[in-house]
Structures are given as C-alpha cells and as structure tokens.
Amino acid sequence: MATRRPLVAGNWKMHGNRVETAALVATIRHGVDAFSVADVAVCPPFILIPLVAEKLAGGPVFWGGQNLSTHKSGAYTGEISGSMLKDYGCTYVIVGHSERRTLYGENDSLVAEKYGAAQAADLIPILCVGETLQERESNRTEDVVARQLNAVIRAHGVSSFKNAVIAYEPVWAIGTGKTATPEQAQDVHRFIRGRLAVMDKSVADGVRILYGGSMKATSAGELLAQPDIDGGLVGGASLSADEFLSICRAAK
C-alpha cells in the first residue's frame, strides 16, 4: 500500500484582513517550521493571496484558492482563473465545496469542469464531496458521494486522482458544531477509497482523503487515527493559529 503523507488545509472562507492575516500566517509558519509530520496549506480569500504568498514564500506552508473559474481568461466579471492562482504561487484550489454547491448552485457537472480547469492550470484540486442531513437520514450517503465522484471520473478518468485530493465533508457537520464520529467518517472514507480501487487500486491507495466536517483540535486525534483519513480540510478552526497547529500536530 502507498504511503500517504497527511495534509491539513485551512479554508478561511470569507474571513480576514491584512493585519489579522499577516499575524496568522506568521504564527502558522513559525509553528510548522518546528515539525514535518504533515503537509500544511492555507486557502485565504482571493484578495489576501498576494499577502499570504509574500509571507509564506520559501517556507514549509503551501497556499491555495477557495474556488476558480472554468475559463482561462475573458469577459467574466468577478471571476479568477487557475492561471491567476498559479501566478501567485498557489499549489491547491478547493472545488465543489458544499457552500458553493448549496449557496451558488454549483452542480456535479460544473464541479467536474472546475476540477479539470484546476489540473489544466497545474493546480491540485481539493475535491469536496458529502451529503446533507436529510440524505444521511435517508441512508443515501454512499449514493450521493458516488454520484459526486462519478461526475469527475466520467469527465477526467480515475487516473486524474493521482494529482488530486478528496475532502469528505458531511454537510450536516459544517459550521454546526457537529462532527461525524470517527467511525462514521472512516466508513465514508473507506467507501470512497474502495470505489476508486474498483477502477484503479494504485490510485486509490495513493489518493489523500481529508475529513472536512468541523474538525477541531479536540476531535482531530481520533479522526486522524482512522486508516483512511489522511488529514483535514479545516474551516473555522484554521482561523486560530493555536487550534490549527494543534490539528497539524495530530496528523502523525
């Protein structure tokens, strides 16, 4: 089985200003310098990426975008292309986050298109998949996650996951303070890896699958100890340097 280096990525969502961000990234960079058990990344709002890139350049922490356009350039007011993110040193970009799917109507087809645009720009997509509370209570979790994965596999092939990360984010646990139990999370992570393994076992063994449902320092250890959980896509807790670094340290 492939050895998977953990990844802890912070999704700052629409938070931060220049002063707060400079202090936050300085503390994170200093803290990450002290250990090397995991890859660490932060995904700030677009407008803060140049500042983050300046503060993190040459250090151990990666950075990325929270979204991208399907287009390379053109008359698309308000959009940001993959090549623009790459120009500012981004390594990762989040695609298909549940907030994009729910609040902005991004469907599976559009998410798959953005995933392809990310890879075409030499970015690593962090593909978000997950079910709502209603879908979980209807025992449809696996059907929903399979549908979301299948859209990408149909468009780009299972081999594309050699250069991608998957984040399982139970929608019912995002911003609610609820967290899936380690066993619930592991069940879905195992399902995702197994579904890919049917098509290509080496790809399935190598792909990193993150947990993205309100991970905190207090829950990180048990979650990250599960065999198929390879890190976290961290929301609110990534806005606290101490909390975020505690999660990073738990990713052994």
Image (tube, grey):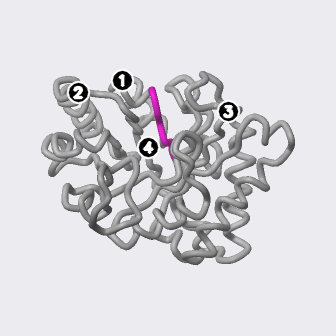
Of the 4 image quadrants, the one containing the N terminus is: bottom right
Q: Which residue is mark 3?
A: 172
Task: Say whether disc 4 or disc 3 marks the residue closer to the N-terminus.
Answer: 4
Q: Is residue 134 left or right of residue 10?
A: right
Task: Say whether disc 3 or disc 1 marks the residue closer to the N-terminus.
Answer: 3
Indicate yes or no whether the magenta region holds residue 35: no
Q: Quadrant of residue 177?
A: top right
Q: Which residue is mark 1?
A: 240
How many neighbours does mark 4 have within 10 angstroms: few (below 14), some (14-19), or many (20 or more)? many
Q: Which residues are magenta?
A: 231-236
Q: Nearer the viewer, mark 4 or mark 3?
A: 3
Task: Say whether disc 4 or disc 2 marks the residue closer to the N-terminus.
Answer: 4
Which of these two is toward me, 75 or 19? 75
Q: Residue shown at 28%/44% (left/top)?
A: 46
Q: Against 103, is 193 above or below?
A: below
Q: Which residue is mark 2?
A: 17
Q: Quadrant of residue 219?
A: top right
Task: Say whether disc 3 or disc 2 marks the residue closer to the N-terminus.
Answer: 2
Report, in whole angstroms, how far the alpha carbon at label 3 lies from the one at label 2: 28 Å
Q: Secondary structure at mark 2?
A: loop
> Do labels 3 and 1 touch, CB within 8 Å?
no
Report, in whole angstroms, how far the alpha carbon at label 1 lies from the one at label 2: 14 Å
Task: Say whether disc 1 or disc 2 marks the residue closer to the N-terminus.
Answer: 2
Q: Is residue 212 left or right of residue 249?
A: right
Q: Amino acid at mark 2?
A: Asn
